[in-house]
Amino acid sequence: MARTRKRTCDVTGVTTSMNNFYSNQSHVKAVDNLRRSTGATKKQMRTMFNNLTTY
């Protein structure tokens, strides 16, 4: 039985399956989709998720 490989997203801090990442990026696909649809930068997304976990 194969073990599920996991990685930690550098934007959200969530540890999840490698399948949720693009091969050459360090953040999950959902973050990338949010970033594209809102026009926000990766730094702005990181700040938003940091604020959400702080409050």
Image (cartoon, rainbow, N blue to C red):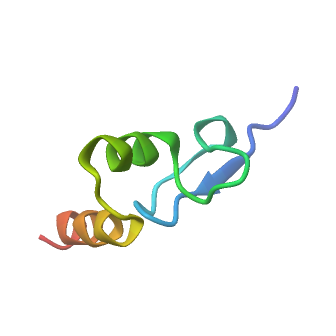
Relative to 52, is 2 on the left or the right? right
Give the answer, above or below, for where 32 lies relative to 4. below
Give the answer, above or below, for where 8 lies relative to 33. below
Residue appearing at x 64%, y 56% in the figure: 25
Where residue 46 sits, quadrant-wise, is: bottom left
Residue 41 in percent (x, y) is at 35, 64
Nearer to us in this view, 55 or 28: 28
Where residue 55 sits, quadrant-wise, is: bottom left
Residue appearing at x 40%, y 40% in the figure: 33
Residue appearing at x 41%, y 48% in the figure: 31
Give the farthest residue toward the front.
39
Give the answer, above or below, for where 36 lies relative to 42. above
Relative to 24, is 46 on the left or the right? left
Nearer to us in this view, 1 or 26: 26
Relative to 51, is 36 on the left or the right? right
Residue 27 in percent (x, y) is at 53, 55
